[in-house]
Image: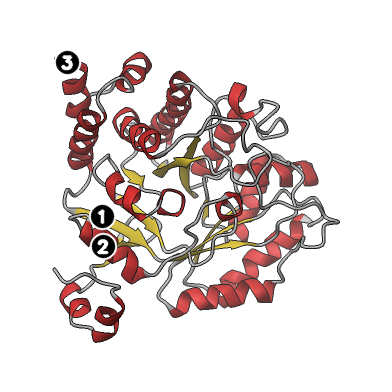
Amino acid sequence: MTLLQKAASGERLTSVEAVELYDLPLFELAAAADAVRRLRTEPDTVTYLIDRNINYSNICTIACSFCGFYRTRRQADAYTLSFEEIGAKVAELEAVGGTRILMQGGVNPYLPFDWYLQLLAYLKTNHPNVRVEAFSPEEIKGMARLTGMSSLKVLEELKRAGLDGLPGGGGEMLVDEVRRARHVAPARISADEWIDIMAEAQSLGLYTTATMVIGFGETVAQRVESMLRVRELQDASLASHGNAFSAFISWNLQSEGVRIENKVPSVGAFDYLQNLAVSRIFIDNVQNFQASWPTMGYKVAQTALHFGANDFGSTMLEENVVSQAGASHQSTSEAEIIRQIVDAGFRPKQRDSLYNIVREPDLDAMRNDVSTADTGAFPVL
């Protein structure tokens, strides 16, 4: 059996074999990743989510060189949203049928821990039907440092107040040699800390996702090493309590106008699609892989659906982080996501954040809707 045949069969690969995948012709690699996708998900279906990103504060003390979003406390455009401002954003999401907010900010030492607990209680009281997935492992570590509590205790208190899940932010590259390099983010949370906090969140039954960003100047071996950390935690969590990463999401570093610009080699669509295909094959215990239209654009995201991705991501009614570093796509409509999925040759289905199917859009009704037909928001098939 050749490596390509083994990859397409869904059999587990070693790290050495995964590194060798990067040497294969791109479209042969894509065919293997697509075969694995079809083994593990519904072949003709691509899912999507209606949600909103809310960045509650942009004050942060970590100062990652690839982040154009963070501000120091004294900068004129530093902010922290009020509960009422956050609630208004959630209400806008509810008005369009959204089911989840993804809420993150900086590591802000000026917000007391009670502020977070009171925010969660406020959201659960006023918006009980919207899931709150918030606070990356980096933020959890900041809260633990602020309070003197363990990260596990912090997570327990946040869950009690209403937290539903932990987003995968801060994963980037789970190799300390890369993530703590002087030109990247020497103050960043370590790979072990990120893994440990995610493991704790999973042990508490919180929803989690894993993320990966390429383009820091890392080698393909380091990319595989980062993937292996995810696969190993997934194995351990599934064996221990059954709650593990629901999805894997990757994208290319966005570096326009930030301090890391011109300090790392550029990576493009080829690298993104190649890395996505390898991750789909190598991380064999995560079912869902998400395409990244906000960073890569619609056409590359459509292509990603043939390189192992089975999910088109979400509407992201508001996006303030990667857009500050050059990502040109910030939010979209449900109709546009449906159009992109159909154009790529798949059947769209709306999901919740746990990947349960919520509804299957009525494509015939959308085709007959004059308002969408006039704007070109939906294709006539």
Q: Residue furthest front?
A: 262
Q: Are marks 2 and 1 in contact (CB under 8 Å)?
A: yes
Q: Amino acid at mark 1?
A: Val
Disc number at residue 349? 2
Do the residues bearing badges 2 and 3 touch, measured as CB atoms within 8 Å? no
Q: Residues within 10 Å of mark 1 (few under 14, many from 20)?
A: many
The CA distance from mark 1 to mark 3 is 30 Å
Q: Residue at x 53, y 31 (%)?
A: 173
Label 1's element? Answer: strand
Look at the image and tell me in which quarter the C terminus lies.
bottom left
Q: Position of residue 136 (x, y in %)?
A: 60, 47
Element class at badge 3: loop
- Taking depth in this image into account, of 141 and 5 the one nearest to the observer is 5
Amino acid at the residue labelled 2:
Lys
Q: How is the image coloured?
A: secondary structure
Q: Earlier in the sequence, mark 2 or mark 1?
A: 1
According to the picture, the residue beneath numbered tag 3 turns out to be 2
Residue position marked by numbered label 1 in the rendering: 46
Question: x%, y% of residue 34?
Answer: 21, 38
